[in-house]
Amino acid sequence: MTKPMRILSLFFLLASVCFASTQPNIIIILTDDQGWGDLSLHGNQTVETPNLDKFAEEGIQFDRFYVQPVCSPTRAEILTGRYSARGGVYSTSAGGERLDLDETTIAEVFRSAGYRTGVFGKWHNGSQYPYHPLGRGFDEFYGFTSGHWGLYFDPMIEHNGTYTRANGFIIDDLTDKAMSFAAENAKNEQPFFLFLTYNTPHSPMMVADPLWEKYGNRELKQKGTNAKNEDPVHTLAALALCENIDWNVGRLVDKLKSLKIDEDTIVLYMTDNGPNGDRWNEGMKGRKGSTDEGGVRSPMFMRWPGTFESGKMVMEPGAAIDLLPTLADLADIQINTDKPLDGISLKPLLTGNPGKWQDRFIFNAWRGNISVRTKRYRLDTKGNLYHMLEDPGQLKDVSKDKPKIARQLREARDKFKTEVVDGAYDENRPFLVGHADFNITHLPARDATVTGAIERSARPPNDSFFRNWISSKDTINWDVDVLESGTYSAEILYTCPEDSVGAVVELEFQGATTTATVKEPHDPPFLGRDKIRSIKSESPVKIFRKMGIGSIELEAGTGTMKLKAIDIPGSQAIDFRLLTLTRVR
């Protein structure tokens, strides 16, 4: 090799090393309804989470990190770096969880920088494309778009628009798929952004027998803040599910090491809100759904071996809105959006060069309740002020002792309510059908309304189905916006007993119809109920059968799509779970 060629080769080698150093892989692990206190690292004496404890000790921990009180708003803030109200997220089901389409997502930011992007698990920010993950910057989706899933063993699951069956316990399966995604990209020397969104310890509290044998009869060594409201069985089930999470996080970290990309990968671990029960949470006030400290304080660990200082504790508050600017900053990626971010980059806190860090307001909001957090204080939704470093349980209102601070935080809260929360929610957004870039549209029972005697299988719409369809006058309805005219193949998921065979179902939209007769009985048992350790309100789950109901010509435009049972020969028509429309022309 000539000297000029050696110099050129050295240049490209140095350039590639420099580029690689600014292109770390990113993994965000987000759990569902796990509280700050659900880790042995944080003092819980009943649960065992050795892998997460080690993860935290090898990386950087945040003493105070804040999310929103419930699932979908926190996810929206991770995705956008902006408060969820700005993105139109006002509910956790029936369309209110959808993130506005003019918001730029973290996946779009990283994909535009050359990353391959994937989300595995619970999405919860929209189902119909382009609200779907594949319309928000992700190249790969394996999971479910609903707010929760009712079966954790071999459940129905979506892979890039098509439903299939998961393999084994859902968290184990999600981890397997995430590790395969990491391995594939490592093999191709492709930087990747991986969003691993576990759906436990959210109810139903479905725990495998070996773990329940270990936890079911344990003595709870610590009680919840509202001990009289605690359900010990629910608590033990939640902690058992947390141990399963711990095992899977350990597997993932070991996989990164075996792939030799451990030092090239930033892994972040957090939860989406406070605990889903009145269990021990280090004495904090509030749980899931509350804007008090216990409802919004999340564990937050960041691990980047060889770059981040092991064992470091960050005392300055951080929040979900900070993840997009922080991770983009760490990867040296430009964020191209015309919408100002609410979050800030925490990189100076992580790399040890914070300078003089400015205090700020962090807002928590849900269902009209708003609280404000600074480094030292929280103003609750009633206007009471608490010194959180001295009074983490929010027991003593100090607003009279600190009138200037109380007034300052109340003014900030009122401004946030007026400028961000009020008028931010549009409940009149139809469900989109037939986007030009995606030919499959799923319309689940969750997103429908009904007339007559038809009833939902559970009060929470997520993962529910419709039953008691006893009259031909009753209908299942979706307010839709058909984006592309064309021929659509229609398919439903149904169950029915023998005496319901012969029922005739009809799909109708703007005068166009397609009709089919139920020819096969399908009356399966409910699944997983023997693994539910604490019964709550989620729908029971069974395996539904696919049935094509023909093709229908849909004209572009808005209107009500209706599913009818025009003939019911037995005691009822069908139980209904899902309508899928596939554009074929």
Image (spheres, helix red, strand yellow):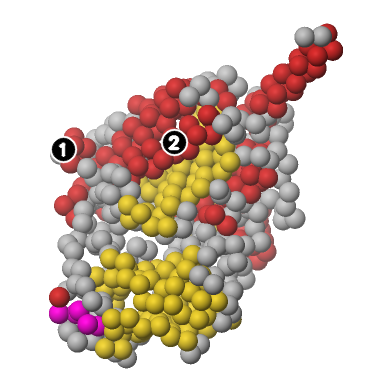
- Horizontal side of 92 relative to 575 (left or right) equals right
Residue 250 lies in what quarter of the image? top left
Q: Which residues are magenta?
A: 499-503
Q: Is residue 256 above or below residue 273?
A: above
Q: Is residue 6 above or below residue 152?
A: above
- For label 1, the residue is 213
**Residue at 40%, 45% in the rendered image:** 198
On whether residue 502 falls in the magenta region, the answer is yes
Q: Nearer the viewer, residue 212 or 1?
A: 1
| Disc 1 crowd, CA 10 A, few/some/many (<14, 14-19, 20+) | few
CA–CA distance in space, label 2 to label 1: 31 Å
| Disc 2 crowd, CA 10 A, few/some/many (<14, 14-19, 20+) | few
**Residue at 38%, 57% in the rendered image:** 163
Q: On the rendered image, what quadrant is the C terminus found in? A: bottom right
**Residue at 38%, 37% in the rendered image:** 176
On whether residue 119 falls in the magenta region, the answer is no
Q: Nearer the viewer, residue 504 or 63?
A: 504
Q: Is residue 261 above or below residue 339?
A: above
- For label 2, the residue is 180
Upstream in the sequence, badge 2 or badge 1?
2
Could you say whether the residue bearing mark 2 is in a helix, strand or loop? helix
Q: Nearer the viewer, residue 440 or 67?
A: 440
Residue 20 lies in what quarter of the image? top right
- Horizontal side of 336 relative to 144 (left or right) equals right
